[in-house]
Image (tube, rainbow, N blue to C red):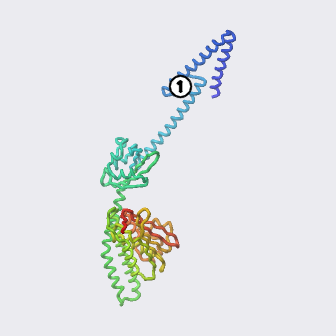
């Protein structure tokens, strides 16, 4: 840089000295200034013309203009910038190629949509499970390629965490799970996954549970009957009495488990329905349920308090709603100390949901177990549960009943203080009676 500017300053100095000498000798100062200024400007104009032609042709490094001084320095800067840009473009091109290779290799269909929900890019899996040809369909709206209201509802939803399931438009035997991810400026990444194997395994599991439970009921009923007969036999030796009684109790528990498994299987097969059921008189049902508990249990075992909105009804199937309430209440009774208070609340929330709350003063549940309580046969404490009769399926049944009605269960608990089980039904199922 210093040498280039030195050459330029030297030219200016030579032109100035020449102008002074010529003006001194000829005493024609104006002519001297005009001549030397014209020569310097003309030379720079020639350099500028060569530089402009080079820029116009794309500034190729092989045909850089033969210039010197500041113009040479400018050419060098442009050359270095070009080289840096080429290296950057080469690096970005490698990254883009690597990105496309990774996205294309994904087993899930991956589609990039712009703000108009037009296809900008799609991998090969998209063609196999959604029928989207990346070359043919680029620039077209996804809704015009895959005509399914489920996808339109997903894309138009304001919740980015939504996930839906649908049948593949290419193969009706394939089940797909679709999710969207918002990124950048109004960009959407749509991911479709083939879950056919998972669906088939779920169906197989449901069929196995339903069939095995049904087939086991008959022989188990026979075994339980014989055990009951032996248990009632007064001539049975005392050494066998305790064994037969324990076997009889376990047979009864197995029958309860099979019955609950059949109930779960029916609930899973039934699935979600928005309009199922009739109006259930919840206040009367809860009073009847509490009365039944007080008949079967000792009167002083638990103090059950009812806080009920007498005007609040719900649209559901009565025996399923009764099963839900029975499971929640029996769960509170089992895991609360005798004589403790249990509060049952039925009320309407501010957002219009009908909620049943069962509050106990039991030993409580640690936070790490709360999210898994509705799993089948999940045990918080195996030793504790062995002391309490039950199938381990009650909360799972409650969860499935609520999901079929569009509701949910919320569990709050604190060790040594107690637990609150809240079952909420959506607002479209609530009914207010005068």
Q: Circle 1 sits in a helix, a strand or a loop, which is it?
A: loop
**Residue carrying label 1:** 64
Q: Nearer the viewer, residue 369 or 37?
A: 37
Q: Position of residue 152 (x, y in %)?
A: 36, 50
On screen, residue 310 versus residue 38, left or right, reads: left
Q: Position of residue 244 (x, y in %)?
A: 38, 83
Farthest-out residue, bottom: 235
Q: Position of residue 127 (x, y in %)?
A: 35, 47
- Please state, as top left, top right, bottom left or bottom right, where the C terminus lies in the image: bottom left
Occupied quadrant, residue 166:
bottom left
Task: Residue at 61% x, 24% y: name it.
Answer: 69
Q: How many marks?
A: 1
- Please state, as top left, top right, bottom left or bottom right, where the N terminus lies in the image: top right
Q: Nearer the viewer, residue 227 or 6?
A: 6
Farthest-out residue, top: 26
Asked whether residue 423 is in view, the answer is: no
Task: Residue at 50% x, 23% y: name it.
Answer: 53
């Amino acid at each position: 840089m210093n040498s280039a500017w030195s050459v330029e300053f030297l030219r200016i100095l030579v032109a100035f000295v020449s102008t002074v000498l010529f003006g001194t000798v000829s005493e024609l100062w104006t002519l001297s200034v005009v001549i030397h200024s014209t020569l310097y400007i003309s030379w720079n104009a020639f350099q500028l013309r060569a530089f402009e032609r080079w820029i116009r042709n794309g500034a190729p490094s092989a045909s850089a203009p033969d210039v010197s001084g500041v113009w040479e320095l400018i050419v060098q800067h442009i050359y270095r910038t070009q080289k840096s840009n080429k290296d950057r473009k080469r690096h970005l091109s490698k990254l883009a190629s690597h990105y496309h290779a990774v996205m294309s290799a994904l087993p899930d269909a991956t589609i990039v949509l712009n703000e108009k929900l037009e296809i900008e890019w799609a991998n090969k899996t998209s063609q196999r499970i959604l029928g989207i040809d990346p070359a043919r369909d680029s620039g077209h709206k996804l809704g015009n390629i895959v005509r399914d209201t489920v996808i339109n509802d997903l894309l138009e939803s304001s919740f980015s965490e939504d996930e839906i399931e649908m049948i593949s438009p290419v193969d009706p035997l394939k089940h797909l799970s679709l999710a969207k991810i918002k990124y950048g400026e109004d960009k959407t990444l749509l991911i479709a996954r083939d879950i056919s194997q998972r669906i088939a395994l779920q169906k197989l599991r449901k069929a196995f549970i339903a069939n095995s439970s049904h087939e086991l009921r008959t022989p188990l009923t026979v075994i339980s009957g014989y055990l009951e007969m032996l248990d009632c036999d007064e001539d049975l030796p005392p050494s066998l009495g305790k064994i037969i009684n324990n076997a009889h109790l376990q047979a009864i528990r197995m029958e309860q488990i099979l019955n609950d498994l059949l109930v779960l299987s029916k609930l899973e097969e039934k699935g979600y329905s928005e309009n199922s059921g009739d109006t259930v008189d919840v206040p009367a049902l809860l009073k009847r349920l509490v009365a039944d508990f007080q008949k079967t249990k000792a009167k002083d075992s638990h103090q059950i308090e009812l806080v009920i909105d007498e005007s609040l009804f719900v649209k559901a199937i009565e025996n399923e709603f009764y099963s839900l309430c029975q499971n929640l209440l029996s769960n509170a009774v089992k895991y609360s100390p005798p004589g403790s208070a249990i509060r049952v609340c039925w009320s309407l929330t501010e957002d219009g949901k009908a909620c049943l709350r069962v509050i106990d003063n039991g030993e409580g549940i640690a936070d790490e177990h709360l999210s898994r309580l509705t799993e089948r046969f999940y045990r918080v404490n195996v030793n504790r549960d062995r002391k309490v009769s039950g199938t381990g399926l009650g909360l799972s049944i409650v969860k499935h009943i609520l999901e079929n009605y569009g509701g949910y269960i919320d569990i709050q608990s604190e060790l040594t203080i107690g637990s609150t089980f809240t079952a909420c039904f959506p607002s479209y199922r609530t009914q207010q009676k005068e």
